[in-house]
Amino acid sequence: MSSAGVAEDGGAGFDTVGCDMFPCYGNRTDTTRRYTLYMVAPVIPITKADTSARALPIPAAAAGAFDGTTLRDTRGRPIRDLRISVTDRCNFRCTYCMPKEVFDQNYQYLPHAEVLSFEEIERIARVAVGLGVKKIRLTGGEPLLRRGIEDLVAMLAQIEGIDLTLTTNGSALAAKAAKLKAAGLHRLTVSLDSLDDKTFRSMNDVDYPVDKVLEAIDAANAAGFAQVKINMVVKRGVNDHDIVPMARRFHGTKNIVRFIEFMDVGATNGWRMDDVIPSREVVARINAVFPCAPANPNHVGEVAERWKYTDAGNEDAGEFGVISSVTEAFCSTCTRARLSTDGSIYTCLFAQRGYDLKSLIRGGASGDALREAFIGIWQQRRDNYSEVRTAETAKAKKVEMSFIGG
Ligand code: SAM
Ligand code: SF4
Ligand code: SF4
């Protein structure tokens, strides 16, 4: 998810609903109109997930189009981030991500044989880094459920020049934080949607208590992850009463809360625009209690917009972030590729189909062939789903977030 206005024509990367199923929206760049999308009925019904989408053919790399320094897509965006989903399984059933009604005991997760091995993941990661990736995020599903995850971290930590990070629901973090640190993980993000125990238990829908996640954050800090990021997905009428308490809890610490707009990811989460609290409203609510001011991004393409607390005389008041995936598209600076649990590359969070690298690897492809495939995929990329989101696009079948990595 994200943005930066560039060329609008695009190549043949028909992989998001914005570009693929609704081509008439493909040239729209007016982000303000999104506020007119308010609607009451869910535009994504809570419905059965479908992971059977066929893979896209891997495009041929354009000869000479990549000079060996910066690989760019059709909109001029370089590749900088790789998010790797190490498992499609999770022990939570967050209502906005893996609703219980869909991800029940009959849900067909990937069989073991279809899941990329650590060696396969490392191989793809190294190719991606060779093409410009600077940041790798391990995610899922719940990445700490993958057996031996610290071994994968240790393998990836050997790759020179990358920022290695992981996003977790925190349930296994207290036990794993020190091991992850020792394995070479640089940074951690923990998801926490409410400080109110009742609300949190109902949002994770497995009755998981908030105290355990707070303990896990403390354990991560104690293990040497000095600045943990805390993701809170905000849903109107569900946990928005917790915006200010969450800000208060981490105000004055090094940990940074990021308030995320509820997104229409996947095809199962019952999304409707009325449930989205625009980030500007989040900032206004916090500012009324803790005065704050915008801060410069740490780097181009940073997903979160940074806000520093400006409390008089308090240099260490800290900061928070907002991620406005719905109301302020940031596609124009989106430098992210995603590697699904079963080894396909998705060039957008809202994609319907990916490019199957696992078959290439298991078919004996050489390093050069893998690199060529990656170049071809990125060169054809033209995704801009969040810039063109409408009630219609939101209804389309998209791959589940737990499968391609949040
Ligand atoms: N299980 C891990 C966790 O929850 O941190 C990692 C995977 S999860 C899919 C990654 C992030 O995506 C989490 O911070 C989660 O809150 C966020 N997320 C999931 N569904 C979302 C949605 N519909 N809208 C916005 N963020 C969402
Ligand atoms: Fe999100 Fe896709 Fe836009 Fe990137 S291109 S910001 S993943 S919607
Ligand atoms: Fe699991 Fe993370 Fe999705 Fe919640 S957001 S269901 S913890 S993958």
Image (tube, helix red, strand yellow):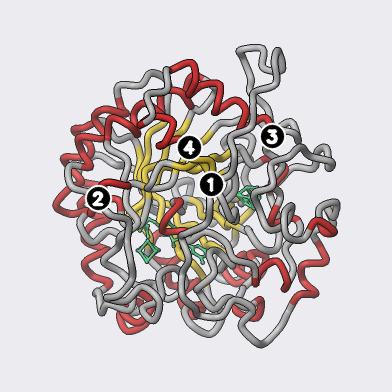
- Near mark 2 (Cα within 10 A), the count class, few <14, some 14-19 or many ≥20, is few
Kind of element beneath mark 1? loop
Left or right: 269 as drawn, with respect to 351: left
Left or right: 22 as drawn, with respect to 41: right
Camera-side mark, 1 or 4? 1
- Near mark 1 (Cα within 10 A), the count class, few <14, some 14-19 or many ≥20, is some
Q: Which kind of residue does numbered mark 2 sit on?
A: His
Q: Is mark 3 within 8 Å of ligand 2?
A: no
Q: CA distance from mark 2 to mark 4?
A: 22 Å
Would you identify the image quadrant in which residue 171 lies? bottom left
Kind of element beneath mark 2? helix
Q: Which mark is residue 55?
A: 1
Q: Position of residue 394 (x, y in %)?
A: 66, 69
Specify the farthest residue to the front: 363
* Sequence-earlier tag: 3 or 4: 4
Q: Position of residue 277 (x, y in %)?
A: 62, 73
Q: Is residue 312 visible?
A: no
Q: Is residue 226 visible?
A: yes
**Circle 3 is placed at which residue position?**
380
**Circle 2 is placed at which residue position?**
112
Q: Which mark is residue 82?
A: 4
In the image, is residue 401 above or below residue 70?
Answer: below
Q: Position of residue 366 (x, y in %)?
A: 42, 18
In the image, is residue 281 above or below residue 338?
Answer: below
Q: Which kind of residue does numbered mark 4 sit on?
A: Leu
Name the residue: 40% across, 76% down: 102
Labels 3 & 2 near each other (Cβ < 8 A): no
Q: Which kind of residue does numbered mark 1 sit on?
A: Ala
Camera-side mark, 3 or 2? 2
